[in-house]
Image (tube, rainbow, N blue to C red):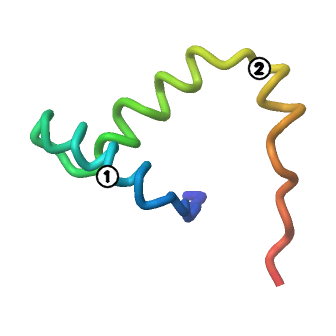
Amino acid sequence: MTKFMMSLRDENYRVLTGAAIDRGISVQELLRAVIIPDWVKETPRGIVADSWPSIRPRR
């Protein structure tokens, strides 16, 4: 399984925390179940491919 780490500004994390608390779930669950699937559905593939940062090989 591929893993990644995400950094957020404090204000963005507070917004996500509030949304997660409202739903009775954790921020991680919110990202996995709501945010990422919605983003994938709404973002055209060409935009993702052109703007996604290149993946650096592990050292």
Mark 2 residue type: Arg
Crowd rating for badge 1 (residues with CA inside 10 Å; few <14, some 14–19, many 20+):
few
**Quadrant location of the C terminus?**
bottom right
In the depicted structure, whether residue 50 falls above or below residue 58: above
36 horizontally vs 57: left or right:
left
Counting from the top left corner in percent of width and height, residue 38 is at 47, 22
Rendering quarter of residue 45: top right
Please name the residue shown 24% across and 37% down the image.
19
Task: Describe the element under mark 1 as helix, strand or loop.
Answer: helix
In the depicted structure, whether residue 47 falls above or below residue 18: above
Mark 1 residue type: Arg
Viewer-proximal residue among 10 and 21: 10
Crowd rating for badge 2 (residues with CA inside 10 Å; few <14, some 14–19, many 20+):
few
The span from disc 2 to disc 1 (Cα, nearest Å) is: 29 Å
Number of the label disc, if any, that sits on residue 14: 1
Please name the residue shown 87% across and 53% down the image.
54
Q: Nearer the viewer, mark 2 or mark 1?
A: 1
Viewer-proximal residue among 2 and 13: 13
Task: Describe the element under mark 2 as helix, strand or loop.
Answer: helix
Q: Residue furthest front?
A: 11
* Mark closest to the chain's N terminus, 2 or 1: 1
In the depicted structure, whether residue 52 falls above or below residue 39: below
Please name the residue shown 38% across and 54% down the image.
13
Number of the label disc, if any, that sits on residue 28: none
Question: How many marks do you count on the picture?
Answer: 2
Counting from the top left corner in percent of width and height, residue 53 is at 83, 50
Viewer-proximal residue among 17 and 45: 17
Viewer-proximal residue among 37 and 16: 16
Number of the label disc, if any, that sits on residue 45: 2
